[in-house]
Image: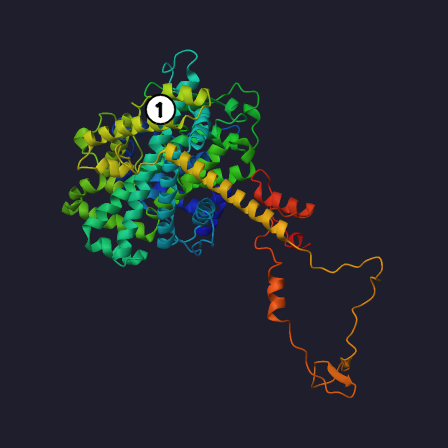
Amino acid sequence: MDTKKLHRERHKRWGTPSPWAAEWFAKTVSFCKTQEGKKQFEEWLLTTHGPGIFDQKLLEVYAPPQRRYGSYTGNAKMWNSAAVELGVSDEFLKQAHTFVAGERLCEPERTLPPPVRRRYESSSDWLLRRTDALLMGAKVPSIQWDELRRIAFSEFDHIRDQMEAWRTQPNFFFDGLRERARSTIITPGDAAPGEEWSQACMDAMRSRLHLAQTQYAAWSQAARLFEDFDQMGATTASAALNVIKRDSYMLGRLVGLLCAISELERWQTGKLPQVLTSSEYLRPFFHRTRDQNGISKIYTNDAHARRANMRTNSIELFLANWRQIGGQALAGPALLAELRKLTVHEAAKVTSEALQTIGDLAPASEFGDAFRNSTFATELAKLVEEANRTGVSKTWESLCLAIPPRKFNGRLDSISVRYTSFAEYERSYRRQSLTWLGVIWQLDCRDAFKVLLETDQWGVQHYDWMWYTMDNILWEEAKRLERAPGSVARLYGLIAPDDKNRPLATKSFMDEVLRFVDEVTASEKRREQDEMLRASFVQHIPTATHQDSVAKGPERNPEEPKVKVRKRRKGKQGLTQPEETLVGTEPFEPQGGPSAETKNAAETTVPDLLPMEWKLGRKTVDILHRLLDPKEKSGQMRWAEFEN
């Protein structure tokens, strides 16, 4: 049988995205059944899942194939149909596919042109189109160095502004804290009866602070690395590749950056299930709890009345079948693209925090995926493997880790690594993050929350003292854990307690008060000037009296000659200006303009300041309201609405 025809028929039977994907599944199983492929596959399973669950995973992978009947949800039918026909278990096909996709093995020839990012296209939309194109057999697009540089600086500025706003704007901080507390799952037994909300707020504060500092650690490294590449003249991907080929220091820094980005993706993905299932609509579909280790566990509520009648392609059905929901599974661009498609049409079912989390994850996912699935990523993996072989990579520990491994805590979850060539550094960075999380979890300011949250009294001095206390604890713990002086503080963006320029809500509040006083003073001054102008204003426009006719024109000087204006007919060439004919015996002399005294008198009547208020028509007010009110959904507005 023709090979292409075979893959087309398998595509129809299995329900794969394309015949290219069906061919990839077949090649994956064939490779992993060979002696060399099986060895690499099992080594990958051990490296990826860790020795703790490796034996259990092998039992699931090598289980005999079993055809499933009944109704299917999600991609379950595709995996089962393909696995049974290829003679393997569903888990074998899933794990093997993840293995070959990460290592870029067994891929059929890509014949379609690579996708091109559109101008001003968001990260979510680009990842959606890119994933769909790759599954259809399109060529992998080249790395977009300028776009990655823009993401690095943009996200770094964003997280810096956010961390400063938390300290200077109490309303902004507590509004976000309340929203995060509604989606937080507290560990059973942590809260006393009646203190569940206080515990949720405290856990939400710790979670938000740790995630913000994880973002700072990733994007600050990215911004500094791109700045150094710019100073070296490496402003393109090819130039940067040449730099890391001859400079192991820059290669080690890039490895450390990718470890930080992978850790950021992991924490943002771990947050997704909590915020996605926290809305009033979706919460009844799930059971939300935590185990004894503090890991969130979210299961479907089969007893819910609408559980059995979930609509196809609905977000509740997708979340119910999301594998390892609430665990440490990594969300690739495919997962992010699927969430993007669902939330576009069903945004009312999720909270604004969930949409914001998806938006924050998209740049990190795009950044990390560019260094995993591109020609640049292939060359990078070769350079790292060469550094491992020669022992150069052993010198990168100080570049990747701010805390020495001997100071890590003993706890380490089994995680799925993204970069097998430097998996040990990725795991070490994970342990560093968990060690710092343990420091943040020691913070306890629920007494301050009771005053500032329950009474809604924004005492800026108390608010500044709360942040000073937390900053002081974090600063001292960072000094205890740091590898070199200031290494941990620089990594996580900590603020020294004795810093004279540290952001304060008190200073921000006083700046707003002084700004308000200046505005009031300026307004009073303008009002006084307006009153003085109105008092000195004299009307110079002539008005008709009851003795005069309004239609009567001004009297003409009898000494002036009459002037008759004769216009040329249309179609005549030559002169286009009207021709003046003098009637009279005396020659015409042009009259002079107004005298200087007349000009000065006219200028004194013009007001120096414009009025403070303007009257607008009802239609103009409606247009401005639609544009400026954030609660209004204006959509697209035609230009004719502004002109009329």
Question: From the viewer's perspective, is 550 left or right of 588?
Answer: right
- Image quadrant of residue 633? top right
Q: Indicate whether 515 appears above or below 568.
A: above
Q: Indicate whether 637 appears above or below 277.
A: below
Q: Residues within 10 Å of mark 1 (few under 14, many from 20)?
A: some
Q: Position of residue 356 (x, y in %)?
A: 46, 37
Please report the residue visible at 60 percent of the width from the left and 62 percent of the height from the top.
603
Which secondary structure lies at badge 1?
loop
Towards the viewer: 632 or 102: 632
For the rendered model, the colour scheme is rainbow
Q: Position of residue 219 (x, y in %)?
A: 33, 43
Looking at this rendering, what residue extends furthest in the left direction?
A: 391
Please report the residue visible at 22 percent of the width from the left and 50 percent of the height from the top.
250
Three-letter amino acid code at the position of disc 1? Ile
Please report the residue visible at 14 percent of the width from the left and 47 percent of the height from the top.
390
Count the labels in the image: 1
Looking at this rendering, what residue extends furthest in the top direction?
A: 193
Q: Position of residue 475 (x, y in %)?
A: 25, 31
Tell me the quadrant of the picture where the C terminus can be found: bottom right
Towards the viewer: 551 or 630: 551
Towards the viewer: 429 or 112: 429
Residue topped by disc 1 = 295
Please report the residue visible at 37 percent of the width from the left and 54 percent of the height from the top.
146
Question: From the viewer's perspective, is 9 left or right of 65?
Answer: right
Towards the viewer: 15 or 242: 242
Question: From the viewer's perspective, is 509 left or right of 308?
Answer: left
- Image quadrant of residue 639? bottom right
Question: From the viewer's perspective, is 318 left or right of 404?
Answer: right
- Image quadrant of residue 440? top left
Q: Position of residue 395 (x, y in %)?
A: 16, 43
